[in-house]
Amino acid sequence: MRDLASETSVVLEAVGLRMERNGKTLLDVPQLALNGPGPTLILGPNGAGKSLLLRCLHGLIRADKGRVLQDGSVLSADHKARQAMVFQQPVLLRRSVAANLDFVLKRQGLSRSERKQRIEELLAEGGLQAKARQNARSLSGGEAQRLAILRALALTPETLFLDEPTSALDPGATQMIESIVMRASERGVRIVMVTHDVGQARRLAADIVMMQGGRIVEHGSAKRVLEAPQCLASRQYLAGWLVT
């Protein structure tokens, strides 16, 4: 797996992003810059625009107005090729666990022996060695999500977007996925992750983006936002109030 830790950190920016549907503002982000080390976690209530922002940053959705920049340039196909995204409900190929990984590695032009070695490394990374020949679609929820993340990491992305990857998982499965995510971050992969779990933000985040009503209401270091949130919406959300 490529070691990115010594490479220049990817800088992602959103400038003037705005989306409206039927007169309702879905996203209104005048300025956002993600340029520090460690995972960025995006928090907020349902309907806050978290997943929509993630998709815009990855270029899956184009906002009505504004632009997304990477390292100062408008997000391009080349930039997107160096990104990967895992959705809340993973989509796996109808083949074995190992074959799901091999499919991605073949596209990178690796030889059969190189692919075999990388598959073994990835399976060990996710604790899925015993499941290598099992049909991927028969995995448990946590195992399927681990495979989806490993398959994304097989692309050696500079940036990995994760949309609530542990939302329906038990604590044990959540811990395993968080371990994979943190190891990837330590290797230099930029992690941008949506979550509704404040505890998870405490465990993983280097910085936090708080959203409400399609807007970013607060952005700062995890320590500062979690210990001394400056806006009312953040304080209410972190205190467990029902925020809409």
Image: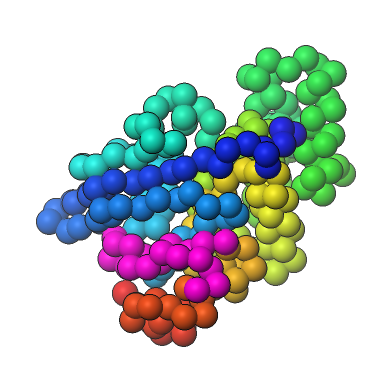
Task: Give me the residue at 29% from left, 39% from top.
Answer: 67
Is 181 or 149 nearer to us in this picture? 181
Answer whether residue 179 is visible to the viewer in this image. Answer: yes
Task: Answer left or right for 163 relative to 153.
Answer: left
Task: Answer left or right for 9 relative to 14.
Answer: right
In magenta stretch: residue 37: no
Task: Give me the residue at 14% from left, 53% from top.
Answer: 22
Task: Answer left or right for 68 relative to 166.
Answer: left
Q: Is residue 221 above or below residue 59?
A: below
Task: Give me the residue at 60% from left, 54% from top.
Answer: 38
Q: How is the image coloured?
A: rainbow
Determine the image quadrant of residue 204.
bottom right
Task: Give me the residue at 12% from left, 56% from top.
Answer: 23
Total count of labels: 0
Task: Answer left or right for 13 relative to 189.
Answer: left
Q: Give percent across and percent down for residue 86.
A: 55, 45
Is 244 or 36 nearer to us in this picture? 36
Answer whether residue 92 is visible to the viewer in this image. Answer: no
Q: Quadrant of the N terminus?
A: top right
Tell me which secondary structure the magenta stretch mostly adopts: strand
Q: Residue furthest left?
A: 23
Q: Give percent across and percent down for residue 36.
A: 53, 52
In magenta stretch: residue 222: yes
Q: Give percent across and percent down for residue 187.
A: 70, 44
Q: Quadrant of the C terminus?
A: bottom left
**Boundaries of the magenta span:** 206-224
Q: Is residue 168 above or below residue 126?
A: below
